[in-house]
Amino acid sequence: MRQSRREFLKTVARGTIASALPLSAFKFLSPAEVRAATEVGKGDVRWGFLVDTYKCVGCGFCVKACKLENEVPYDTPVTRTWVERYVVLKNGRVLADTPDGARDGFIDPKVQEEEIKPEEISKAFFVPKLCNQCENPPCVQVCPVGATYQRADGVVLVDRSWCIGCGYCIMACPYGVRFFHPVYKVAEKCTFCIHRLVKGMNTACVDACPFGARKVGNLKDPNDPVTKVILTRRVAVLKPEYGTKPQVFYIGLDENVR
Amino acid sequence: MSSHVYRPLFVVLAVIALILLARSFVVPPDFGIGERGFMYGFHRKSNEKEWEAFKVKFKTRQYCKDCHPEKYENIMSSKHRIIQCENCHGVAIDHPENPPKLVINKERSLCLRCHSYLPYPTSQRGKLKGIDPEKHNPEMQCVMCHNPHKPDMEGW
C-alpha cells in the first residue's frame, strides 16, 4: 500500500479525534429519553400506592367499593382489587384463600373448608392486591393493537373501543390483575380510579378502607405523605424478580405472599 | 423487462395504496406515541379523557355531611367514625336525585366483616372486638341490640 505523507497525517489526525470522543457520543437515545431530558417540568405526577398489611383486617370494604364505583359486575367472580388471607401454621404449612376476592370480607375462620385451631397459628394476615401500575408494564408490551398503554403519570389503562379481546395482556401480567370484562368483552383492569385522582380525590378503595391500610400518592412529590413513608420506611414490592418495577409498595410483606 | 413482470408489481402497489388509504380512515387522528414512548405509550390519546370522565359514585362522607349534619356528628363522635357512610348505606351516586333513597344494609354479615373474631395475633384483626357468629345470638340482626352509630353503648 502506497501512501502520501499528506494522507498519512490526515488519517492520524482523524484517528486521534475519534479516540478522544466519549462513548456516550455514539449512544442512540430513544424518543422518550430525549423528550424526558428536554421537556423539563412536564410530568410532575407519578401515582403510586402504599399498603400496610399490619392495618388490614380483611373487611373487604375496598373490594365492595371498587366493584360499585367502577361498574365491575357485582356477582361475577372477577374484581379489579382483592384481599388475600394467609395463615401460616406452626408446622410450616401455609394456607391462603380469597373467597369472592373478599368482596364480603373474611367471616369464616375456616380456610378453604379447613378447620384451624388458634393455637396452631404461627402468623396470619391479610394482603390487599391491585394493579401495580408497573414502570415496565409487560401487559402493555404484548398488546398487538395499541389498546393498552401507560399514561405520563404511570397509570396503565385499556382503551375499550380499541381492544380486540385477544387476552395476551391477561396472560402477560405476572400479578394476575387483568381479567376479561363480562359485559364489554374486553380486557379490564384497575385504573387507580384515575377519574377520581384527577378530581383531587382518593381512589374508591382508599376512601372505603376504615383502617388506612391503603393509601395513594404522588411519588414525584417528596412532601407527599405516601412518598415520605416509601422513602423512609422499609417497604417491599411483589415479585421484584420479574423486573416490572411495581409501584404498589407494601409494609410488612411476608415471604409466603406470592 | 417485459410488461408481464411489471403488471403484478402494479397490483401489489395498488393493494398497498388501498391499505394505506383504509388505514387513514380507520385509525383515529390522535392515535400515536404518548409520553411513555413507543413501547408503553402507543395509544389513542382521547381515551385518557374518556377514562377521566368516568362517573364518581362513591362520594365519601364529605358529600353526606351537609344534608345530614346530625348523623354526621353522631358517627364522628363514635369509634365507628373511621367507617365511611357509604360502606353501610350504599353508594351515593347522585343521591337524592338518583337513587332517591339509599337502602341501609342491616345484614349480620356486614358487621361480621370486622367483628367475626379471627384469632390472628400478627394482624390488626385479632385486636378487634369480635364474636363467634355461630354462638353469639345466631340468626339475629346485630342492630336489634347494637347501635352502629354508637357502638360504645349497648342498646339504643
Image (spheres, coloured by chain):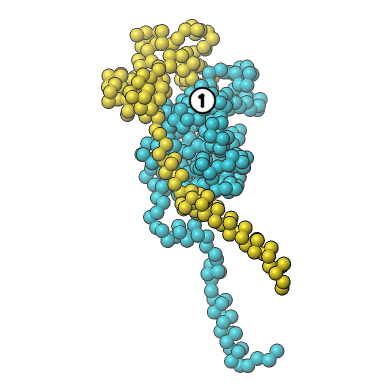
Q: Which residue is mark 1?
A: A74
Give how far across and how far down residue A212 sits, in percent.
Answer: 42, 31
Say which residue appears at 65% left-offset and 26% top-offset: A93
Say which residue appears at 33% left-offset and 20% top-offset: B75
Give how far across and how far down residue B107 sits, in percent.
Answer: 46, 14
| Image-based side of B13 in relation to A56, left or right | right
- Where, quadrant-wise, is the N terminus of chain A in this rendering? bottom right
| Residue B82 seen anywhere in this rendered image of the structure | no
- Label 1 neighbour load within 10 Å: few <14, some 14-19, many 20+: some
| Residue A238 seen anywhere in this rendered image of the structure | yes
Q: Nearer the viewer, residue A42 or A140?
A: A140
Q: Which chain is cyan?
A: A
- The relative height of residue B25 versus residue B146 in the rendered view (above or below) is below
Give how far across and how far down residue A138 sits, in percent.
Answer: 58, 46
Give how far across and how far down residue A31 sits, in percent.
Answer: 50, 60
Q: Chain of mark 1?
A: A
- Where, quadrant-wise, is the C terminus of chain A in this rendering? top right
Q: Nearer the viewer, residue A77 or A41?
A: A77
Q: Which chain is yellow?
A: B
Amino acid at the residue labelled 1: Tyr
